[in-house]
Amino acid sequence: MPASRSSLARRTLVAATALPLLTLAACGYGSESKDTSSEQKVAAGAEKIDGLDSVKIGYFGNLTHGTALVGVQKGFFQKALGATKASYSTFNAGPSEIEALNAGSIDIGWIGPSPAINGYTKSDGKSLRIIGGSASGGVKLVVNPAKIKSVADVKGKKIATPQLGNTQDVAFLNWIAEQGWKVDAQSGKGDVSVVRTDNKVTPDAYKSGSIDGAWVPEPTASKLVAEGAKVLLDEASLWPDKKFVITNIIVSQKFLTEHPKAVEAVLKASVDTNKWINANPDAAKAAANAQLKIDSGKALPANVLDPAWSSIQFTDDPLAATLNTEAEHAVKAGLLSKPKLDGIYDLTLLNKVLKAEGATEVADAGLGVK
């Protein structure tokens, strides 16, 4: 490609202050939530944490939320919370999860970078904190190999993204600009036709020939590959160290202030879950798929699950510098007024857990609470 490694690393992200549609989540599967609470055994003699009857945890039914999927399936959260019930809700998009957090319907959630920034900036920094990382990667440009054989062939083609202004949409717009091509961000018209298509229908759009490819998260990318598409680009290759945030852990500031012990317990469960995932990749993949089946009624077939799972890295590090870079490039794209992100992170409890585990503590890129 003609751009340098450093310039290619530039990704953009749009927050809701720019356009109404920009509140849509990175994975954009809709806006409904459903309770997935399950009766899990509580250890004999276990006590409630902070006197709480329950801690309400939200996540997407998506492989990039694999920490949550596995943590629920294997009981890591319930174990850490003792006699306090771990209650779960799944969401199809970021705005509904942010609304649930603001309303107190959930206390802690797994969510993508775009809605986390949106929720923070829309509330003038009062609604949430990012308290940990969960996953990196899992985003690809997949194309029809009969029409697109190289990067140059993308010009003039119809490429889907999940939604106007969502994380992948702006990343693709930025990548287009890096190639020296011109596209109107609002209409999607230009040297490349950017077709905003919900991930649920993108595979059908590809099969019908109405799009020539898509810049999408997993498992949508691997679903397209199962339909004959080829991976032209893994977004991770555009980032330093091939890492960029795709999923964070957020908490309401009210809950964090009032129940730090419960938050610490959930973070301990998340760290334990990621450790188990990385030590047992095949069993973890199966556990995530089993929870997907419970949550959605349908498991992923192996030809979709295997490549999708292998492209995601599970990490406790929120990769704060990459979130900051995404926000900066959203501003550069003219789709976001410069956001005030100071204080969006509070990694105090996560670093406490990591230190106790003998693991390396993580940084907030200067965006932590003072």
Image: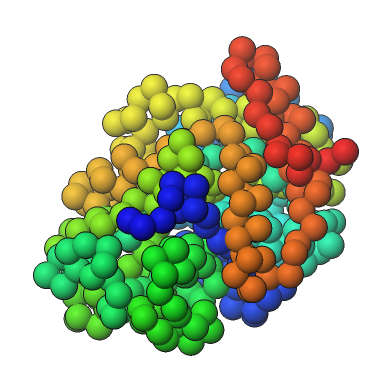
Question: Is residue 167 or residue 151 the one in the foreground?
Answer: 151
- Does residue 105 show up? no
Quarter holding the N terminus is bottom left
| Residue nearer the viewer, 363 or 301 | 363
Residue 367 quadrant = top right
Where residue 288 appears, as percent x and y from the top left, is 38, 42
Report the coloring of the rendering.
Answer: rainbow
Residue depicted at x 44% and y 63%: 178
Q: x, y percentage for residue 11?
A: 52, 57
* Residue at 72%, 62% in the rendered image: 119
Can you give x and y, in whole percent of width and height, for residue 25 in the image?
55, 64
Residue extending furthest left? 146
Horizontally, is 344 left or right of 89 in the view?
A: right
Place of residue 289 in the rendered image (x, y in percent of width and height, measured from the top left): 34, 45
Give the vertical position of 84 relative to 147 (above or below): above
Residue at (38, 62) in percent of width and height: 216
In the picture provided, is 196 more to the left or to the right than 365?
left
Residue 225, image quadrant: bottom left
| Left or right side of 225 for 199 | right
In which image quadrant can residue 32 be found?
A: bottom right
Q: Which of 283/176 is in front?
A: 176
Q: Can residue 339 be seen?
A: yes
Q: Residue at the spot x=81%, y=64% of the render?
A: 123
| Position of the C terminus by quadrant | top right
> How many numbered callouts?
0
